[in-house]
Image (spheres, coloured by chain):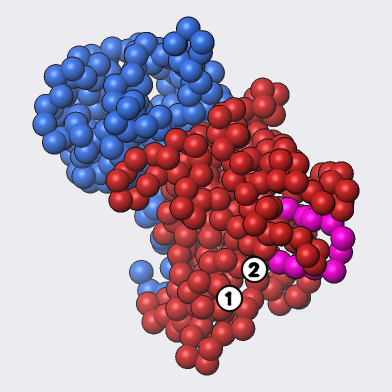
Amino acid sequence: MITQDRYAEVFLEMIRRAATQLPEDVVAAVRKGRDREEEGSLAQKALDTILMNVELGRKQSAPICQDTGTPVAWIHHPVGVSTRVIAKGLVDAVQEATKRQYLRPNAVHTLSGKNTGNGSGNGIPFLHFEEWDRPEVEARVILKGGGSENVGAQYKLPDNRLQAGRDLEGVRRVLLDAIVTAQGKGCAPGTLGVCIGGDRVSGYEETKRQLLRPLDDTNPIPELAELEERVLREGNELGIGPMGFGGKTTLLGVKIGALDRLPACYFVTISYMCWADRRAAVRLSAGGEETWLS
Amino acid sequence: MAELRLPVSEEAIRKLTVGDAVELTGRMITGRDAAHKWLVESFREKVAPYLKDTVIYQCGPVVRKNPDGSYDFVAAGPTTSIREEPYEADVMCRYGLRGVIGKGGMGPKTSEGLQRCGGVYFHAVGGAAQVLAHAVKRVERVFMLEEFGVPEAMWVIDVEKFPVMVTMDSHGGSLHTEVEAASREKLQELLGLEG
């Protein structure tokens, strides 16, 4: 049986990796954007600064961004494993990571306005548990920054202003509108996590889960793969650019999932992930041995 | 890249225009949501000299406290500026600030304040917390740490070659307005809608 302390130890390392090391696929996408921008432009300067920043974070084991975000974790576990023990291990890890400055004390008591000081709070970190048939425990975490969270959006179709109906063309239209509304404020170039369908809760949850996907994967559903590619291309034609300075690199990725819906509802929900698209994942064998996942 | 020393005169600030890339060296102060609200509620004499003729950095840093009681900035990128739109022009004109550092740009009230009182909006690269923390050479002192907590406290810092871009100037120019207008036009085109 894996103890709370063992979970805490492994999850601390998972959080450290997420906060200080930008995944390779994200770095590659930033670099590609950088090479497309005009030589000497503000856009290119911004992307150069980002690449330099990513290097520094990795080398010094220090947070890439000072807004270390909300830790959102998805945990798969075998039958009979206590999810409470895992949850406590993760809270311990968040508190220790805050003590070691991998995370900023990022939880504020909403009514008093007081910072809890230790990185955890009511609803922070946010956890999803799912039982599976495998013997291992697998944890995946994203650190979701607040600036980008503020530019998330939920549309309901049809939308008359955008002439968006209840079909994939309607989805495309609201996604492009969301990108323009966000401008550079979510720390462009960003990645869109999108959910078509679901309700107002499950939609947002699915958008976050979509953000676990590597940027260079292909959606297994062909029409969604096509839509992802098209919105990525057209999003980058909007000219918003890194930080909203203007330029060709507005988005790094678009990831779309679909949930079933009620006949009356057709939501399109969007989470905007900043360029600091921080994630990490680990698998723990029944004996507690860890394997790092990409 | 041009270097700009802080404190800075109104004359020097009015020479800057949208698109200038600048490196700042000298003393500045951080302040975000709680600080801005607090600064306009009444005139804060203790902090006022640290705002005069310098810039306020909208930043909630990660800070390490050293055994000798001193502090270091561990990560320190800009936060989203638009939340301070109701306050910034008032803070600027009342305390004699010469500029703001943030990200995402600000609105018409701030632009009007920049023109009237002589200031600019500097955009730092959002999320570049390491590059920017490295430009912070010393933490001189801190205000309201107990009351506001680490991210919201007002940290007085010495910076060297702190990289920023002018995206709003004292002549009414705003890169954000330009980019937004152009992208909205492109959106209308992609969606086949009338402007």
Residue on which disc 2 sits: A256
Residue that sits furthest to the top in the current view: B68
Q: Which portion, as a residue range, is magenta? A: A130-139
Residue that sits furthest to the bottom in the current view: A263
Q: Name the amino acid type tagged 1.
A: Ile
Q: Residue at x 47, y 90 (%)?
A: A264
Nearest the camera: B97 or B34? B34
Whole-Å distance between the Cαs marked 2 and 1? 7 Å
x and y percent of residue A99 in the render? Answer: 56, 29
Q: Is residue A214 above or below residue A66?
A: below
Answer whether residue B159 is visible to the viewer in this image. Answer: yes
Quadrant housing the C terminus of chain B: bottom left
- The hue used for chain B is blue
Chain letter, colour red: A
Q: Residue at x 11, y 31 (%)?
A: B42
Query: Circle 1 — which element?
Result: strand
Chain label for disc 2: A
Q: Residue at x 28, y 37 (%)?
A: B34
